[in-house]
Amino acid sequence: MSCMRAWRTIFLLAAVILIVTGVSMRFYGAARARYAMSVGENPVHIHADRADGRREGLRRRVEVPVRNTGRLPFRIRQVETSCSCTVAGRVPGVSIAPGQQVTIPVEVYLPAYGEKSTRLTISTEGDVIPQTDVELRLHGPRSNGPYIQTSFSPVQLIAMVPGEEVGYSFDVVTSEPKLDGEHWLLGFQATSGAAKVEFVSVEDLQEIADVGFVIRRYRFQLRTVGPQSEDENITFLLRPVTRTPAIRTTPMPSFRCQLAPDTRTADM
């Protein structure tokens, strides 16, 4: 009898332990589910080349969705980036209700060649959800033909006095055929006779041996003469001069030259 009683006690204790453990796990899971988020596709792949083969600039804008998959609302405190090539837009500090989705606007600058990874880190107010990382994989252009890439927007040049010479230095990156002792990019020609472009330097970045191409970075110096009067604005483009003129390249940003505002005021 004492043996039977001992076994009965053991079974009762085991049952109590299982019940307590099950209840604890249930409450623990419910507590974890109170605050939760999902971020959609992770990692996010961003390509320089479009599906139709066209090539645009190196700057891209994407949106990262964030959905509340928990039972309680939360707020996004901040979004940090791991690289200066990635800029996250501001997210309104509104409460995100269960089931609601918001988007984080992100602007990235793709590499001139190859691939690169960067990261977004999303934090919530009160750290109710552990920091969430979103990986962005940036894919530079494919080297399937000569091309020129620029990383700057349309440029506005300011002349302090009428007729003053103003200058601007700029870099371009090319994927070009490797020629014996010669460069594929010969320079730039301005659509304005008052503007001149001078070669400064060139640097080899990477050789793509299987296709006979090389990635190069060129630096040029633009010089132009400012307007002679406040009513004159000089706008022009730069046209690349290459050894294969029949092959079209990426259009260069436009340049606009005008007088400084204080100069205009002084002349009036």
Image (cartoon, helix red, strand yellow):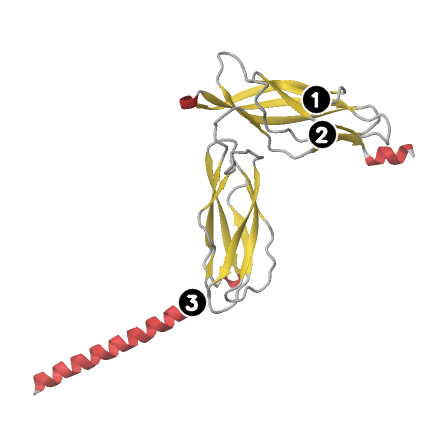
Q: Position of residue 107 (x, y in %)?
A: 57, 44
How busy is the neighbourhood of tag 2: few (under 14 within 10 Å), some, or many (20 plus)?
A: some
Residue depth check, mark 1 versus mark 3: number of the one nearer the observer:
1
Residue 100, placed above or below residue 3: above
Q: Would residue 12 appear left or right of 243 to someone viewing this image?
A: left
Q: Would residue 86 appear left or right of 24 to someone viewing this image?
A: right
- Rounded to the nearest angstrom, the CA distance separating label 2 from label 3 is 55 Å
Q: Quadrant location of the C terminus?
A: top right
Q: Residue furthest right?
A: 268
* Marks 2 and 1, the one that precedes in the sequence: 1
Q: Residue at x 63, y 33 (%)?
A: 152
Circle 3 — which element? helix
Q: Position of residue 128 (x, y in %)?
A: 48, 63
Q: Are marks 2 and 1 in contact (CB under 8 Å)?
A: yes
Residue depth check, mark 2 versus mark 3: number of the one nearer the observer:
2
Front residue (pair 134, 131): 134
- Rounded to the nearest angstrom, the CA distance separating label 2 from label 1 is 10 Å
* Marks 2 and 3, the one that precedes in the sequence: 3
Residue 123, placed above or below residue 233: below
Q: Position of residue 80 (x, y in %)?
A: 53, 50
Disc 1 residue type?
Ala
Q: Are marks 2 and 3 in contact (CB under 8 Å)?
A: no
* Marks 1 and 3, the one that precedes in the sequence: 3
Q: Residue at x 55, y 55 (%)?
A: 103
How busy is the neighbourhood of tag 3: few (under 14 within 10 Å), some, or many (20 plus)?
A: some
Residue 148 position by quadrant: top right
**Which residue is labeled 1 in the image?**
190
Q: Is residue 235 visible?
A: yes
**Which residue is labeled 3 in the image?**
33
Circle 1 — which element? strand
Which mark, by number, is residue 255?
A: 2
Disc 3 residue type?
Ala
